[in-house]
Each structure stands twice: as C-alpha cells, then as structure tokens.
C-alpha cells in the first residue's frame, strides 16, 4: 500500500496520459484507484468493435465515440470526485506544446506508434518532465522511465525504422507473402480503386517497358460497354498472366530465382462456376449497406481462417472486384485500403494469394492476410493490465524523485532465471543521442530585427562555444563552417548571415526549432525560438535571451559494479560499442533504388529488438538481487530469442 | 450452427486476442466454467480479464457485505454507499462484470464456500480461492483433487504491495512451441497442503523471502483464528515471535524472513491497486494457459513485490513429487 508520503505526492500531482486504448484504459483505472486526482488524457481515436476485447471501459454502444471522453466517463463511475480532462486530438497538434507539457509532474505513454512516441519524448525533454514509456504486444510488454539528464531518453537507443521493401521486390521478384500483400494493397488496389492521379509502380519492370506501359494504361481502364465480369477477368489475366509473361521474358532476373507461373482465369475457373457467381451475388442486392457487402459471404465462404485454394481465391477475387463496381461505384477513385473494409480486405487477400501462388509462396487465410495488410497489432487485456500496474509503480517513484529505484521492467512470456517480470536499472543518457544529447534551449529573440549573424556571434559562438557550427532549420541548411564548401555555398551562407531571421530562405519564426550542430565537438543543440519584441538594453544588451542551460553532470561510471561479482551468467557477453553505427534514424531516407512502399506495424516488441542491437552497450544491465549479488546480463534479457519483425 | 467456426460476433470481438492465442484456444475458453471466491481488488482484476477473454461462465462467491475498506481497490463497485449498501461483494461485482462481455454468463452463488461439496465444484473447470483461511483453501483443493475431472485450482492473495499466486493443475498435459515445432509436455503439481508442507530447510537457498513471510502470516491467522487479512499493528510482536518459532522449528536462518517485510504485511491490509492489476493479469494469463493446454503454466507459486519489482516463479514441491 502507498505510504502517507506517497499518498500525498500522488494526491497533489497532475499527470498526463497519452493514449486511451489498450494500455490507456487499464492505466486510467489503476491511476484512479491509486489515488491520483488530476489526470489529463489525450487520444485521437474513436472506439471500434475490435477494441472491446481489452479496452474494458468501452461498450458496444460506445462504438464511434471518442476514446478519451468515454474512458473518463467510465472511470468517474467508480471515482466520481477526481478530475479527468480528456482531449480528443492528436498529441502532435501544436496545442500540445512545451508549455502544455510543463504543467505535468509526469507523462505516461500508452501509444502504439513510433512517431508519436518520439514526439512525446522530445516534448517531455523540452519541458523537463519525466516520461514513463510502455508497450505491449501479445504476452510481451515493457515499461521504461526516462528522466532528462539522469536516464536515457526514449530515443537514446535507436528504434528500428518501419520496414520498407525495395520497389523491384514488390513489382517483380516477391519472395514472401508480405511482398504480395504490399503489391495487392499499394499497387493493384490503389490502381483500380484509388486516386487515378497517384503515381503507381504497377507496370514498372526490370527492363525498359516504355512501350508496353502505354498499353498497360489502357488495360486498367474499363472499356466502353464492357461487361463487368469480362472486365474483371481481363484485369485478372493482365496482372496475373500477361505481366508475369513479360517479366519472364527477362532472363537475367530469373537466373538465380524460381520462375513464377503465369495464371489465367480460364485455367482456374470453370464456366459453370461463372454462372454460379451471377446467381448467388443477386442475394446481395437486398443489402444496401456498403459496409456489409462481402464477396466471401456471397459465395458462401464462411471461415476467415480457412486457406482457400487458388480457384477459391480467384472466384472471390473476381466477385470482390465485381461488387466494388456494382455496389460501391461512387467510391471508386477515392478508396484507400482500410483494414475494417471487409471487401477491400477480401480483394487484397485474394489478389495477394493469387500472386503468391504464381511465385510459389504459401497462401494465407483472410484472417492472416488482414493482419499483415492492416498492420494489426495483436493484443490481450492481461498484458495491458500488468503493464499498467508497473507504469503506476514507476510513476509514483517519479513523483517522489526516488531516482535510485527507477526501473525498466520487462514482462516476459517465458521466465528468465525464474522471473516473469524483470526489473533492470535504466541506462545513463547517451551522450551522442540526437535528441537529448544536449539541453534543448529556448532562445527569446526578435525574429524581425535580429540577423543570422547576430545569432551566430552572440549565441552559437559566445554562449554555446561552437565554432564550427552547422545551423539547420529542419532539412534546410542555413549556415555552416567548413573547409570543403564550394564557392556557391559559401556565398549563399554569407548572404544568409546578413538576413533577418524571419526572412531567411527557411524563415526562423516564433515556435520553430533550429538545430545547431558542431561536428567537431559532437554537440547538437536544439533551440526553440520564441519571438520577443523588446529587450532591456541594460540587462539584456545582446537583445536575446538563452535559457535552459544546465551544466551536464559528469555521470559516474560505477566501474565496481560492472565487474561480475556474483558470477556472470552465460549471457554476460561484453559487447563493445560499435562506433560505426550511427543512431541517426531521423535522417535515414532509404537511398538508391529503395523507395518506401509500405510500413510494417510498429509493435511494441520492436522496442525490444532495439535492445538486441548490441551496438552500443556502454552500461551493463544489472538485475539487483536482495543479497547484493550483482548478476550480469547482456542488454537483452531473454528477449534475444524473439524474432525481429520481418 | 457450424461448431467448427466461431460466430461472426465472436470473430469480430475477439479478433485481436485470437491473433495472440489462436482460434482453438478461443473455442476452449468459450466452453470453460470458472468459480471465484473472495471478491477483493485483485480478484476483481482477474474477473475482468477472464470475462474479456470470453469464458462460458463465471460464478462469484462472496457473501460479505460491502464496506468502504473492502471496495477500496475494487473498480467494479461504485463507492456510493447508497448504491452498495446492503449488497454483498459478489452481487455488486456481478452486476458490473456482466457489462464487460455479454457473451459470458456471470452469476452469484451464495453460501459458505468451505461447506460446498465435491459435486458443487464438479461444475467448474477452474477454481480460484482468495480471502480464505488456509484450512478452507486446503479443503477446496482436496475436494477438487478427488474429482475425476481435472480442475485447475488457484489461490491468490495480496497484502500491502506484495502478491502471491498458487497453482495446482494436478497432472497437466500441454503443448509448447520449440523453434518451429509444437512439443507435448507434462507437469505434475503438488496440492497446496503438500507444497507448504515441504520443510523450509529443504527449499533452495534463494527462494524468495516473500514465500516465508506469507506462510508466517498465514500461520498466525490460523493459530489466532483470524479472518484472512484481519491483522493490525498490535499483532506485530506476536507475528515476529511466531516467525522466530517457525524458523527455529524449520532450522531456517531468520534472515530469510526479514522483520521489515513482515512489518509491511502487517501494517497495511489494504491492497495496492497496481499490484492488483499485475497479479490479476498474471493469474488471468495462467488460467487461459491452463484452459487452452497451450504454453507452459507456471509451477507452482508466483510472487510479486513492488519494492523490488520482480515477478518471480518458485517451485515449491518435494523432490519426489512434481516433474
């Protein structure tokens, strides 16, 4: 039970929850029961049926309503006198700025995507508010504490970027089912039902196919008075038959690969069945509701877990195709894939399966395909409940500044050394972390009067001591000092120096952040710009005010602790920090031929895989035993068996 | 109705969890009957979890009338005396739990659970005993074991910011994933009586101190004929004395049962909500594993202490029993 001291810290606190979903519902409930009385909660989503298996504050009748608002109402039922402030919005909205974050004692994340997590991490750092991060996938989960200056920030360890696939793998040489899904979803579905003006790689081949692309353009358009079934089969034959034949003609591609097999509708369908299609789908006419239109249903295929044959996939493909045109014509040209759109899921599943069949890749059920196409994260209530409990325990420690007891806790599916819940001490901050390496500063300055030169002289050099700076606003390079710059750039920078801040090519105005880097010192500074009109000539003769600077405390390397005292386990591999790997996931745009085509879910488990990246292990993970036996584990306690998402 | 396939409603509702544990487990859950007695915060959490998971039925036993203390960590019961006054804990929880999943039948069974016979327990696949004396736990466990049906038996208790789960699956067959294969395994569990009879000095040296501390509390309540959890600071001297006696009798060094730990367990009888969530979650997972026969269940005790944050499994069984 919480002590008196803890209770009063809890009672007087104001906490921010980001996310009112799986973790959020459990967390809000536990916070309320634990005595928290002022809770703010942000969530941009509305409630869906698939949430109800674990987001227990919601009911069927709430589907479509704001999660943050309904969560609040549900919790007030058993804690009517606490204050819960819901925000139905995106945490990335400018309203949720540093000042907003500053009003909280702690921020608790219950998010499901990397982008938002990074965003909250940066704001928490800027506001100097501790952040408790968490994530769950299936039976796995973890809770981590991030306190500026004391522990790593959320981005100190590189998080894997969403998976991307080379264009040619998707268009020409798929080897995995997910490649077929991406093809079906982002190419075929998009081409047929999406924005016609959107660039589409569908007919990109390894060889120059300039002439055939003209033909291909026609191929996807419905011909005048073309029968819908005929149209469908023509498309089928074009993408699964003709396009494969064309690809096969390029011998080079298939030298070391299995050749695909072209598939034509005549081969997989019998004419009799075509008739059958026609009869059964008449039943659909009675249903007006577009969301209930289903090719599976109209063909009597009931089980989404079944793996259909090539023939069944083909039938459903053609039926789905037809139903789009017959029942949802108005939407064609505007559709984007939505995992909750049954017909879209059926179309993508079957298209992917037919392609997979061509390429000798195993077929998948609708259920499985939907999960891949929809980036569905599998989730259960129990893990979320456990993680929520752990979050509150850490939050209470944070409120009391109980810094020595902060823990990162891993919820394991299989016990490691008898533990299902494994606490470890947080890492120290990463000195070269892009985000938290230096204090984010605030600069008050008159952006209409001060020139870039003033900024460089008075702030960058005089205050920050950076003499070889690189000044950037987002991707725009405003100024840099270096030996290898060409004349044009030097001239450009010289010109910039004389410009007033708000008139720079990439204008510096109030609210934006500029980055000042000094590569020689490996120092990066983010500076939040705040416009101020007037400055006291005596007190602030520079006409600008820099704040937020604190001396970075020299963190003691507890060398005694890192030598195995109680005997190391076989896992105690000492990994040497690998300097060649940069932590720059921010700037990583896939170069060369790779182009981002699709994303794979940012399951919380991906956070685990970042821990397996033994590239920088500057502090050993220690699980502290009661008896002061310090046991050494590598950076990946028991998680190293988990596969990275492919 | 096609018995092979889940209903459309189930498929839509359970989609996310089916992706975790599969259709087969979901089907087995939908046939499982759960009995729970002792409706405090931790058990409330467990009930929420198991109802969301989609069992066939959940039966609650707890005739105690609601009091402010009893409901302090129980989110199923609104803290309005006008609303809860006069009703039993089971009744109040039942009303709330029904809402979580209309497909689960939640009901109340009145009476003293220690008086129920084997034929009563035979209706259930899982029995969870909480807020019961040791004698009651043993008795229920025995009744379950006597039946030919394999009933999974659990006890769960939280004191201060600590929690304990006990598991008895008797002879349990299950499958688990090894690399890309499913392998068949089995475990043999001791009864609660057998487990806590294992002499302390026979246990591995590193057994968590919480195990011993809980046994001291349990014994004190037994000897003093107290209701579970009915201790106060006035009892501390008595408890420390009992600890000394037990350690001596077991030839166990007293340092294995720290006074500070016992103090915590005595001074604070209210549950700590975060621990309720954690223990209720672990218990939920375990019950789902037992019902599905998939995944290695924990054997046979689980402990959590918020002070050190570790969730530890201890195998408390004599060398000849258990595998």
Image (spheres, rainbow, N blue to C red):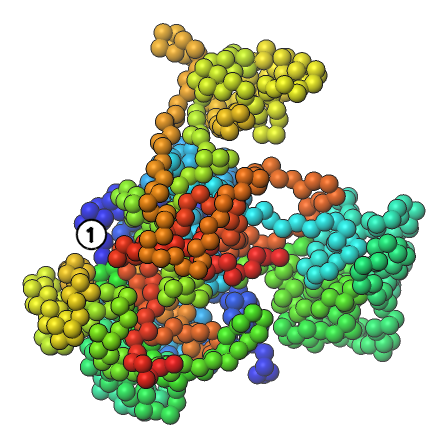
Give the quarter of the image for residue A199: top right
Q: Is residue B251 left or right of residue A106?
A: left
Q: Is residue A519 visible?
A: yes
Q: Residue furthest top?
A: A538
Say which of A602 and B323 sits in front.
B323
Residue named by callout 1: A3
Say which of A625 and A177 sits in front.
A625
The residue that appears at 68% across and 68% down in the rendered structure is A364
Image coordinates for residue A18, horizontal then vertical, percent: 43, 47
Q: Is the residue marked by circle 1 packed among few (<14), some (14-19), or many (20+) residues within 10 Å?
A: few
Q: Is residue B104 visible?
A: no
Give the quarter of the image for residue A257: bottom right
Q: Is residue A296 left or right of residue B157?
A: right
The residue that appears at 34% across and 37% down in the rendered structure is A556
Q: How many marks?
A: 1
Image coordinates for residue A565, horizontal then vertical, percent: 33, 53
Q: Quadrant of the N terminus of chain A?
A: bottom left
Image coordinates for residue B70, horizontal then vertical, percent: 21, 65
Image coordinates for residue A414, horizontal then vertical, percent: 44, 66
Q: Is residue B226 left or right of residue B115?
A: left
The residue that appears at 88% across and 46% down in the rendered structure is A208
Q: Is residue B145 above or below residue B19?
A: below
Q: Quadrant of the C terminus of chain A?
A: bottom right
Say which of A51 and A356 sits in front.
A356
What subunit carries mark 1? Answer: A
Q: Residue furthest right?
A: A211
- Element at badge 1? loop
Q: Is residue A3 left or right of residue B21?
A: left
The residue that appears at 26% across and 73% down in the rendered structure is B203
């Amino acid at each position: 039970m919480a002590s008196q001291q803890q209770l009063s810290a809890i009672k007087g606190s104001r906490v921010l929850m980001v996310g009112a979903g799986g973790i959020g519902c459990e967390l809000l409930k536990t916070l309320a029961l634990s005595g928290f009385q002022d809770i703010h909660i942000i969530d941009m989503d509305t409630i869906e049926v698939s949430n109800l298996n674990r987001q227990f504050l919601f009911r069927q009748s709430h589907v479509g309503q704001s999660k943050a608002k309904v969560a609040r109402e549900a919790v007030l039922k058993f804690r009517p006198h606490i204050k819960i402030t819901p925000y139905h919005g995106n945490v990335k909205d400018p309203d949720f700025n540093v000042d907003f974050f500053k009003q909280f004692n702690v921020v608790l994340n219950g998010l499901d995507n990397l982008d938002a997590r990074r965003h909250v991490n940066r704001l928490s750092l800027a506001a100097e508010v501790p952040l408790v991060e968490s994530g769950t996938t299936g039976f796995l989960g973890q809770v981590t504490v991030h306190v500026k200056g004391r522990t790593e920030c959320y981005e100190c360890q590189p998080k894997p970027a969403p998976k991307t696939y080379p264009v040619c793998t998707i268009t020409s040489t798929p080897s995995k089912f997910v490649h077929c899904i991406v093809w079906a979803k982002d190419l075929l579905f998009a081409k047929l039902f999406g924005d016609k003006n959107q660039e589409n790689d569908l007919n990109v081949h390894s060889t120059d196919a300039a002439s055939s692309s003209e033909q291909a353009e026609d191929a996807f358009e419905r011909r005048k008075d073309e029968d819908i079934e005929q149209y469908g089969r023509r498309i089928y034959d074009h993408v699964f038959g003709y396009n494969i034949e064309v690809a096969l003609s390029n011998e080079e591609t298939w030298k070391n690969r299995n050749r695909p097999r072209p598939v034509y509708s005549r081969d997989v369908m019998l004419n009799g069945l075509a008739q059958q299609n026609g009869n059964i789908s008449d039943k659909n006419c009675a249903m007006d509701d577009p969301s209930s239109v289903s090719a599976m249903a109209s063909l009597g295929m009931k089980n989404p877990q079944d793996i259909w044959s090539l023939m069944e996939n083909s039938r459903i493909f053609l039926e789905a195709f037809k139903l789009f045109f017959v029942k949802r014509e108005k939407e064609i040209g505007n559709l984007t894939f939505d995992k909750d759109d049954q017909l879209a899921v059926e179309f993508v599943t079957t298209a992917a399966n037919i392609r997979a069949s061509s390429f000798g890749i195993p077929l998948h059920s609708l259920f499985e395909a939907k999960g891949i196409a929809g980036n569905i994260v599998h989730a259960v209530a129990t893990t979320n409940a456990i993680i929520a409990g752990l979050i509150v325990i850490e939050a209470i420690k944070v409120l009391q500044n109980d810094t020595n007891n902060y823990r990162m806790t891993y919820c394991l599916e299989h016990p490691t050394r008898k533990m299902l819940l494994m606490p470890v001490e947080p890492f120290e901050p990463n000195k070269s972390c892009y985000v938290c390496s230096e204090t984010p500063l605030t600069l008050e300055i008159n952006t209409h009067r001060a020139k870039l030169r003033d900024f460089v002289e008075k702030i960058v050099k005089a205050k920050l001591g950076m003499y070889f700076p690189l000044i950037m606003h987002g991707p725009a390079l405003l100024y840099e000092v270096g030996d290898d710059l060409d004349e044009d750039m030097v001239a450009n920078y010289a010109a910039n120096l004389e410009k007033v801040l708000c008139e720079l090519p990439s204008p510096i105005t109030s609210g934006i952040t500029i980055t000042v880097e000094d590569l020689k010192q490996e120092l990066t500074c983010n500076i939040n710009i705040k416009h101020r009109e007037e400055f006291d000539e005596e007190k602030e003769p520079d006409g600008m005010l820099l704040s937020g600077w604190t001396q970075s405390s020299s963190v003691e390397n507890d060398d005694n602790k890192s030598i195995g005292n109680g005997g190391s386990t076989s896992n105690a591999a000492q990994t040497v920090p690998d300097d060649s790997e940069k932590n720059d996931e921010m700037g990583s745009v896939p170069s060369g031929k790779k182009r981002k085509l699709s994303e794979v879910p940012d399951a919380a488990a991906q956070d685990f895989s970042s821990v397996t990246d033994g590239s920088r292990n500057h502090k050993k993970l220690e699980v502290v035993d009661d008896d002061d036996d310090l046991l050494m584990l590598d950076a990946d306690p028991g998680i190293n068996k988990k596969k990275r998402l492919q | 109705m096609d018995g092979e396939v889940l209903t459309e409603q189930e498929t839509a509702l359970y989609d996310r969890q089916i992706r975790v544990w599969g259709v087969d487990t979901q089907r087995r859950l939908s046939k499982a009957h759960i009995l729970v007695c002792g409706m405090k915060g931790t058990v409330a959490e467990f009930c929420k979890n198991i109802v969301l998971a989609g069992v066939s039925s959940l039966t609650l036993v707890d005739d105690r009338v609601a009091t402010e203390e009893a409901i302090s960590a129980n989110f199923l019961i609104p803290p309005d005396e006008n609303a809860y006054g006069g009703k039993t804990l089971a009744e109040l929880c039942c009303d709330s739990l029904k809402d979580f999943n209309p497909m689960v039948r939640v009901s109340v069974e009145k009476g003293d659970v220690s008086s129920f016979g084997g034929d009563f327990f035979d209706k259930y696949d899982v029995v969870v005993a909480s807020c019961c004396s040791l004698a009651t736990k043993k008795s229920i466990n025995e009744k379950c074991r006597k039946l030919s049906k394999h009933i999974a038996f659990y006890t769960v208790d939280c004191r201060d910011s600590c929690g304990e789960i006990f598991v008895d699956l008797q002879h349990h067959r299950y499958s688990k994933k090894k690399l890309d294969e499913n392998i068949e395994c089995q475990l043999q569990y001791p009864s609660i009586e057998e487990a806590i009879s294992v002499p302390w000095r026979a246990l591995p040296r590193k057994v968590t101190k919480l195990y011993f501390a809980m046994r001291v509390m349990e014994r004190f309540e037994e000897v003093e004929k107290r209701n579970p959890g009915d201790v106060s600071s006035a009892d501390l001297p008595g408890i420390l004395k009992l600890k000394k006696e037990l350690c001596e009798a077991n030839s166990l060094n007293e340092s294995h049962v720290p006074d500070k730990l016992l103090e915590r367990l005595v001074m604070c009888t209210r549950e700590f909500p975060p621990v309720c969530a954690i223990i209720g979650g672990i218990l939920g997972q375990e019950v789902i594993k037992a019902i599905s026969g998939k995944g290695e269940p924990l054997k046979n005790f689980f402990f959590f202490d918020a002070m050190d944050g570790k969730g530890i499994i201890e195998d408390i069984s004599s060398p000849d029993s258990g595998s």
